Amino acid sequence: AQSVTQPDIHITVSEGASLELRCNYSYGATPYLFWYVQSPGQGLQLLLKYFSGDTLVQGIKGFEAEFKRSQSSFNLRKPSVHWSDAAEYFCAVGVAGKFYFGSGTKLNVKP
Amino acid sequence: DAGVIQSPRHEVTEMGQEVTLRCKPISGHNSLFWYRQTMMRGLELLIYFNNNVPIDDSGMPEDRFSAKMPNASFSTLKIQPSEPRDSAVYFCASSYVGANTEAFFGQGTRLTVV
């Protein structure tokens, strides 16, 4: 069965520091991969997606993610975090038309 | 496009009552999903429609839950009778299968069953 693992439930970083959120998936082939962000009381907004090609993908708000097939990982990064990045981040895989989500990582940003 | 539209945004109901959540997907999308989000279980896929037909309802927790999609522009998720443990945020999402695209989410309905 497909699964998405986000090992970090909470992460706190200082404003201006770099960020990496981890995501591992379990699936026989390479699925479509996504990162979404959810602010409190809001729906999920797409940050970036990977379907094929270049394994480093750029997204909105200065985020990027790297697909590593050998590690079944799709980690999200940002070189310098802003206070407005505080939110919950979800990794997702798309398989056979359906989308499966990890449990999310809550990002706290210290001033 | 206005995006995926869900109504109501908030619903408070008493245990045992029937609850109906509504969703209007993005025009042109051929897939629709209902998700439930709770602190304990995260985002769970409840049911997936393709071209208005339920393809996978294995995530529907109990027979108290039912979902319909009578046409391409409308879907409902019904809980009858509702129980306090159904309290959660319910999201509807739509997508276009066959193209390299993501799921687009509505704002969600926060359901509280007292």
Image: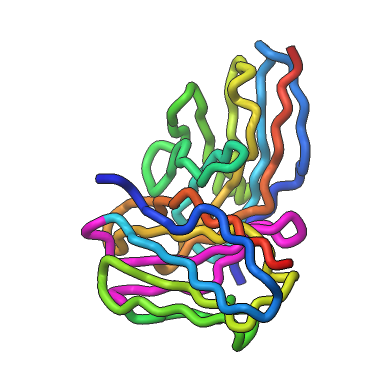
Which residue is outermost to the bottom?
B63
Choose top left, top right, bottom left or bottom right for residue A23: top right
Could you tell me residue A59's position as x and y percent?
44, 31
* Residue B28 highlighted magenta (yes or no): yes
Q: Which residues are magenta?
A: B27-52
Q: How many marks?
A: 0
Quarter of the image with the C terminus of chain B is bottom right
Could you tell me residue A17's position as x and y percent?
69, 14
Q: Is A79 left or right of B26, judged from the image as shown?
A: right
Q: Look at 63% across and 83% down and name the residue there.
A: B81
Q: Nearer the viewer, residue B14 or B111?
A: B14
Visual colour scheme: rainbow
* Residue B89 highlighted magenta (yes or no): no
Residue A26 visible in the picture: no
Quarter of the image with the N terminus of chain B is top left
Choose top left, top right, bottom left or bottom right for residue B32: bottom left
On screen, B83 above or below A7? below
Q: Is A52 left or right of A87, judged from the image as shown?
A: left
Could you tell me residue B29's position as x and y percent?
27, 60
Choose top left, top right, bottom left or bottom right for residue A2: bottom right
Does the magenta stretch mainly form a helix, a strand or a loop?
strand
Q: Nearer the viewer, residue A75 or B10?
A: B10
Residue B103 visible in the picture: yes
Q: Look at 59% across and 21% down and name the residue there.
A: A84
